Amino acid sequence: MKTLYILRHAKSSWKFDELSDHDRPLNKRGRHDAPLMGHELASRGVKPQLIISSPAVRAISTATLVGRELGYDPDDIEVNTDVYGAGKKDLLQVVQGAPSDIETLMLVGHNEAISEFADMLSMEPVGSLPTAGVVGLEFDCESWYDISKDNSRQLFLDFPKNHK
């Protein structure tokens, strides 16, 4: 059995024109929503063995804030450059490349690809994940290489507006 949590980064700031897209930080709402969602995930008993994040500042910040709420050491977050600018098939390759001994994985990335990836794997529609939205999927298989819509079960779909 494999469990995958697919998380869209929290709300980012557009206020610094001089920053590249890659370097945009979280805004105030994002800095609030990421730990909120981490807390909600912790209350569900979520304990990822590995968190993989896009290298973008807003994604790493989200992974760090969520991870802290889950008792995950921020230094253990795996930054994967393939997640930034990826398509849904690229994200599948990233997940399929996870170590086989990892049973529970969290992937932190960007829309549109992160939502399309979730829809590609979930039997139930996910649609467009809002910022800091997360979907939990469980797969009836032993290898990340074998995950698919055909062996998935959606555990939950959650986002910050559910908790305000």
Image (cartoon, grey):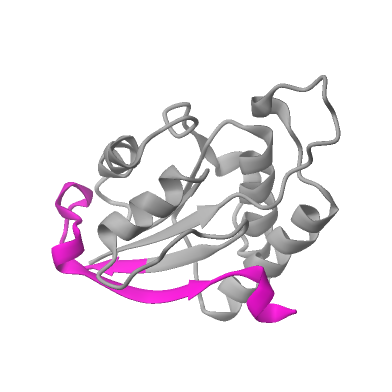
Against 134, is 86 above or below? above
Picture coordinates of residue 114, whole percent (x, y): 44, 48
Instruction: Give the quadrant of residue 37.
Output: bottom right
Is residue 155 covered in magenta?
yes
Apparent side of residue 6 relative to residue 19 in the rendered image (left or right): left
Apparent side of residue 117 relative to residue 36 in the rendered image (left or right): left
Residue at the location (27% across, 59% down)? 121
Picture coordinates of residue 135, whole percent (x, y): 44, 66
Range of residues picked out in magenta: 137-164
Quarter holding the C terminus is: bottom right
Residue at the location (62% across, 59% down)? 132
Picture coordinates of residue 138, whole percent (x, y): 29, 69
Task: Choose between 135 and 112: the one closer to the eye.
Answer: 112
Asked if residue 103 shows in the view, the reply is no
Picture coordinates of residue 9, whole percent (x, y): 60, 49
Residue at the location (33% across, 53% down)? 102
